[in-house]
Image (cartoon, rainbow, N blue to C red):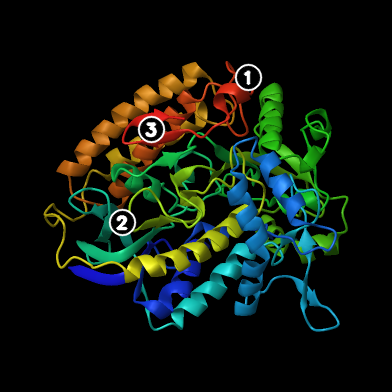
Amino acid sequence: MIHKFDYLIIGSGIAGLTFALKVADTGKVAVVTKKERADSSTNYAQGGIASVFDPNDSFERHIEDTIRSGCGLSHPEAVETIVSEGPERVRELYTLGAEFTAGKDSSGEPVFDLGREGGHSVNRIVHARDYTGQAVEKTLLEACADHPNIHFFKHHYALDLLLDEGGESCLGVCALNSEERRVVYFLSKVTLLCTGGLGRIYLHTTNPSIATGDGIAMAYRAGAVLGNLEFTQFHPTTLYHPEANSFLISEAVRGYGGILRNSGGERFMERYHPDKELAPRDVVARAIDAEMKNSGDHCVYLDVSHLEPEGLKRNFPYIYDNCIKYKLDITVDPIPVVPAAHYICGGVVTDLHGRTSLKHLYATGEVAMTGVHGANRLASNSLLEAVVFSHRAAIDAHQTAGDYIMPDSLPGEEYNGRVEYDEEEILIAHDLIEIQRLMWDYVGIVRSSMRLQRAYERVKIIAEDVEKFYIEQPLTESLVELRNIATVAGLVIRCAQFRKESRGLHCMVDWPERDDEKWRRDTIIKSGEIYN
């Protein structure tokens, strides 16, 4: 089956839905998503959206904070773009119905309650209590559902991008319809990748199960330029509980006054950074990792018991309610926490309009490398980046779609393999857990050349086996995801091996110093070739 649309969006988080709403008046839009349309990393974003609204704040300060967190690799023009255009995009979400925590001034205009997180010099986090992502996702989904030109295709697993004969232009995507058990094709004038991150290549992650690096893997196989995949951000504080599945404890809890303590009750962050609990995320994650290794403990503790109980419940209802499920009362009990893979600062390289190196292919959100985050993302800049660049991409894509003539047929043969459930799922599960353990043990918060080489050698063998399995065996959802996980894990390792220094999120035992003379540039990888 072949579907034809003006705009094709792969992913249904804040980046994709923002783009969909902004192009829907100019053409038919398909939103392809692996699960239900509400399944996305956006839903898991507790903290908020960083933007300048406080009279005591300024664009210059936000830019400085972002570039400082990026450890010398943030692109100034990209940073200036999201900071200067951010307030207008946030106001649009509020006007659309996003229930940000806010009051009103004398003229009836909203006055946002602004939180503060690590790396920010002032309060500038616009939020909806501690469930900002859910509030934004709900608002955008409702708006999209009301638009007649936006069509959702749930339970569709994108397999590979479709290219023209020259391999220079994206024509759409082929996908597995997991409910009808068949491969379908989407041809489009413009394709947007907004598939989120790759957290599921790691054993412990804050990401949802769908975050398997699909967009990065597909873009790489299609020959697109990728960058900075060595910079994986580990969120310092996820709930340590056997049933919690890496439930995230927002950085806003530390901004509200939470204190990190080791098992002996000692407040330890003052030994690692002058900003203590409000130090940048990479510093906090490494500090926690060091405390755990020094003590042999499995976790540290985030203590908010000294804070006013009703204020905690009012400001963090989502965290409070979820901890209660695990018999933890955060107003009394210290919260056991560990770091977990959270956000990839690299991805598919784009310009300031979301354009990738392939014609008619755009990328926004976590899958993209816009240049904003550099070697370490400043807290709550990700949702801001998504809405700003999706807005800019939509404006540019309108022109692209208008100048494009869609082909009448597929550029190649249709998929003729078997699409059915298979009895070899145990092999897929085994390969998956081996990759995740390798990545966690050898390509985690602190790395070494020896660990990276051991990981690369093993992951390379697994990836080759998986590719062979993918060609020969029936097509299943878990096999599709495993193929992408194996591909992306190998790319992350290769980028980490290439950068022989420690910078931001990339911490090397045998290359402990930052080297601006040689390495103050992006790591670029395309079709197997890596350079900077």
- The number of callouts visible is 3
Q: Residues within 10 Å of mark 2 (few under 14, many from 20)?
A: many
Of pointers 3 and 1, the one earlier in the residue sequence: 3
Q: Amino acid at mark 2?
A: Ala
Asked which quadrant contains residue 461, the reply is: top left
- Mark yes or no: residue 45 visible: no
Q: Secondary structure at mark 1?
A: loop
Residue 193 in sight here: yes
Q: Which mark is residue 490?
A: 3
**Between discs 2 and 3, the one toward the N terminus:** 2
Q: Are marks 3 and 1 in contact (CB under 8 Å)?
A: no
**How far, Cα to Cα, is label 2 from label 1?**
40 Å
> The disc labelled 3 sits on which kind of residue?
Gly
Question: Which of the two residues, 290 or 109, is positioned nearer the viewer here?
Answer: 109
Residue at the image point whose x is 71% and y is 24% from the top:
295
Front disc: 2 or 1:
1
User: Disc 2 designates what residue?
Assistant: 158
Q: Height in image: 473 above or below 509?
A: below
Return the mark for residue 299.
none
Tell me where residue 378 appears, x and y as whole percent.
Answer: 66, 46
Q: Is residue 166 left or right of residue 217?
A: left
Which is more foreground, mark 3 or mark 1? 1
Can you say which quadrant of the picture contains the N terminus? bottom left
Of the residues under marks 2 and 1, which one precedes in the sequence?
2
Three-letter residue code for mark 1: Pro
Residue 476 % position (x, y): 25, 52
Residue under pointer 1? 512
Q: Secondary structure at mark 3?
A: helix
Q: Residue at x 73, y 46 (%)?
A: 65
**Mark 1 surroundings within 10 Å by alpha-carbon count, few (fewer than 14), some (14 through 19), many (20 or more):** some
